[in-house]
Amino acid sequence: MRTGSPRRFGAVLALAVVALISGCGKAQPVRSAGAGPAERLAPVLSPGAVSIATRNTTRLGGADPTSDAAAVARTVYPAMTFASRPQAVVVADQNNWPAALAASVLSSSPLAAPLLYSEGDSLPSISLQTLQSLDPLGAPTLGGTQEIRIATTAPAPASYVTHTIAGGEPAVVAAAIEHLLLAADGGTPVRQVIVLAANTPPALAMPAAGLAAESGAPILFVTRARVPLATAAALAGLHKPSIYVIGSAEIGAKTIASLARFGRVTTISGGGEPAVPASAVANAIAVARFTNGTFGWGVKEPGHGLVFANAARPLDAPAAALLSATGDYGPLLLLDSATQIPAELAAYLGDIQPAYTATVPAVRGVYNHGWLIGDEHAISIVTQAELDSLLEISQRRQAGGGEETAPAPAE
């Protein structure tokens, strides 16, 4: 279902192209305005990144997840000063989806690490250029580690302090990432974890990336048949954490019952019932709405950042996870087509669309902002304009011309 109309978004189609930079060549460095030890050379432009902005949306990335990850990293960390450089950068193999997904939690505090992609034993030029331009400072709690290498055999810059987690079974890699997160946080164990089946369809698992980045809850893997030893050991070491299951239909009742031995289990489902598989779109909305005490997004009212990606590009979820842990902290929402907004997503955005009245003017209202990940083949320019309209703050009036207040947030 396509939302909006030519009248609604005609004006928005005049999109402002903020930057359109090819992947070849080098960005020109400029000297930062700071003084003293913070002064350094840093490139302004992000090679290969496309950024197109409307009033309420900003597009980042390009034709593939490698470009998308680089664009997100350079947006969050312009690297103009020491304060705008990351402690460490994560490099994950794009051919290992579970490892990349589990690495999303490293975008959370205290590391707030951007993620870049390698491809097997090679590091694409855009990832290498971005890694070098970010010039990571080194994470003090990890012995000055500058590059965290997840399931990749690509060469690292010789001068960097690195920490490597080798590829392997998803449960083993995810548990190693949880141990690294524990060390990065000075040994303070987390109180929540996110659990998925290792074979969960990637589109259903994508929202876990942003949730892990926002909450700091590591992602651990199980199978329909059992809780793997590595996952069991990690859960036991956390001493009865709260366990949040995404995609419970892929796990099954037997394994969920086994998980309950390690902590209280709560399922997050967009399928109506925990055992009913959800669509990728509905599942992402369910994760965005979900809250349990201080855990979860709980986005049920206006005034939020949101991240939009195409469900057919799962690697965009870990690439964009950093946007869920900084700036306007947005949950990941999914489209199942580049050229249409699903009806359920349009309805959800309508529920949380900002509004104002004459007694509460727009300048005192709250605003939504959307980050769009990828080029027009992921999310078309027209769809971007339609999303802009759905995010725009608008005046609410009654049919008779009187004012009405904004509707109550949807439960």
Image (spheres, grey):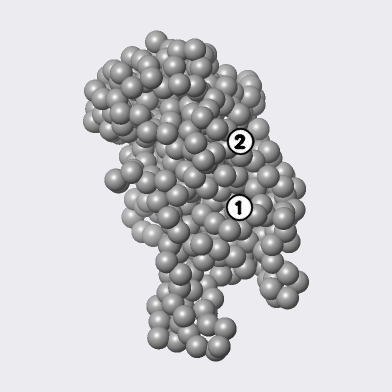
Instruction: Decide if residue 346 is in sight here.
Output: yes
Residue 401 point in image, percent of width and height: 55, 89
Residue 320 placement: quadrant: top right
What residue do we see at 24% from left, 23% from top? 239
Depth order, front residue of 410/66: 410
Residue 6 in the figure: left or right of residue 349: right
Instruction: Decide if residue 160 is in sight here.
Output: no
Q: Are marks 2 and 1 in contact (CB under 8 Å)?
A: no
What residue do we see at 37% from left, 16% from top? 258
Residue 60 point in image, percent of width and height: 61, 52
Label 2's element? helix
What amino acid is at disc 1?
A: Glu
Depth order, front residue of 400/218: 400
Q: Residues within 10 Å of mark 1 (few under 14, many from 20)?
A: few
What amino acid is at disc 2?
A: Ala
Residue 200: assigned label: none
Q: Is residue 174 above or below residue 300?
A: above
Residue 266 placement: quadrant: top left
Q: Residue extending furthest bottom?
A: 401
To which residue does mark 2 refer?
203
What residue do we see at 33% from left, 22% from top? 260
Q: Is residue 143 above or below residue 320?
A: above
Depth order, front residue of 29/394: 394
Q: Residues within 10 Å of mark 2 (few under 14, many from 20)?
A: many
To which residue does mark 1 refer?
344
Q: Is residue 348 above or below residue 8?
A: above
Q: Earlier in the sequence, mark 2 or mark 1?
A: 2
